[in-house]
Image (cartoon, rainbow, N blue to C red):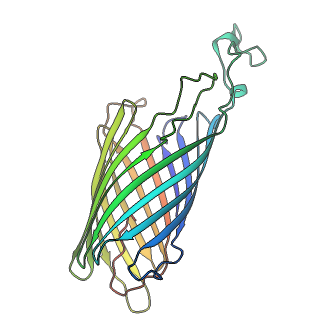
Amino acid sequence: MTNQRRQWGNVNTAFNTFSLYGEMNPGRGQDPDGSHLGVGLQLMQDKSMYGNFRGSYLSGTLSYHLRLNEYQYIGLGMSVSQSQRRLDAWSLTFGEQFRSGGFDLMLPSGEPSLASLKPYMTLSTGILYVFSGEALRFDIGTGAFHVNRPMQSFIADARQRLPMRLSAHSSLEYRLGRRMLLTAHALYQRQASQQYVVFGSALSYDLAEADHDLALMAGLWYRTSDAAYPFIGVNVNSLQVSVSYDIALSAQSVGASRPSSFELSLIFRQPRRHPGVIRCPTR
């Protein structure tokens, strides 16, 4: 899976994020009760402030899906991430560098302790419960990120640590006849004093024939006190392409326009094992 997001694209200091993620289930199908292991690797990069502030993140994930019975299982997971953030202070301007003719970058910045962040490692964990029947699938889970709270400071201040992020999520999939799938999702996240809720729904329509897979999908999500974002996508065989666009609903604005964000996602999956199965657009 690969994802490209440009947040607040009509702002000169837009946030640009790229991510690449892959997962596999070694030994799946070999355990008689259906339990299996999952391993994954994720690479993410982001930049802002005209590219002067950059971050790179490499994460390894490990999960185990324990089958309880024919319809239910519990998933336990953890991840370890190595992160590096960099501030190109030489390209920035500071008050001490201002002179009558403008900013002189050859002058000292007046910030002698300013430096790039040292690389840091974070640990995360989570648990998931899933019920999966013939026409209905339901899951609910929770996760904790940055549980070790590493130091993150440009001025080597040991009191500045990355706050733990807590999340809770749930999703529902319901099959509407032979060719339609309705999905609904909700997510809550909190980090330090900031929190938000995202919820929405999508509809998939299966146009598959005997020799190929084809599905169309569309949906709408809402992020509290921020934005609504419609979503459209198409699934052809093992490839899914989808796009979304944020419609800002908050009081924030840039000149006469509101912030806008665009996201493009590509997902590669294994071929469908069972004919007639409609793929969920969000997992």
Q: Where is residue 193 drawn, in percent x and y?
A: 37, 29
Q: Is residue 14 above or below residue 80?
A: above
Q: Nearer the viewer, residue 107 or 119?
A: 119
Rendering quarter of residue 173: bottom left
Horizontal relation, residue 15 to residue 208: left or right: right
Q: Nearer the viewer, residue 193 or 79?
A: 79
Q: Where is residue 277 drawn, in percent x and y?
A: 34, 81
Count of picture labels:
0
Residue found farthest to the bottom: 210
Q: Where is residue 59 drawn, in percent x and y?
A: 57, 53
Question: Which quadrant holds the C terminus?
Answer: bottom left
Residue at horizontal 64%, vertical 23%? 156
Residue found farthest to the right: 106
Residue at horizontal 41%, vertical 68%? 65
Q: Is residue 28 above or below residue 81?
A: below
Horizontal relation, residue 271 to residue 228: left or right: right
Horizontal relation, residue 1 to residue 246: left or right: right
Q: Nearer the viewer, residue 171 or 100?
A: 171
Q: Where is residue 275 drawn, in percent x and y?
A: 36, 87
Residue found farthest to the top: 100
Q: Nearer the viewer, residue 98 or 196?
A: 196
Q: Is residue 210 above or below residue 5?
A: below
Residue at horizontal 76%, vertical 14%? 107
Residue at horizontal 45%, vertical 58%? 77
Horizontal relation, residue 214 to residue 89: left or right: left
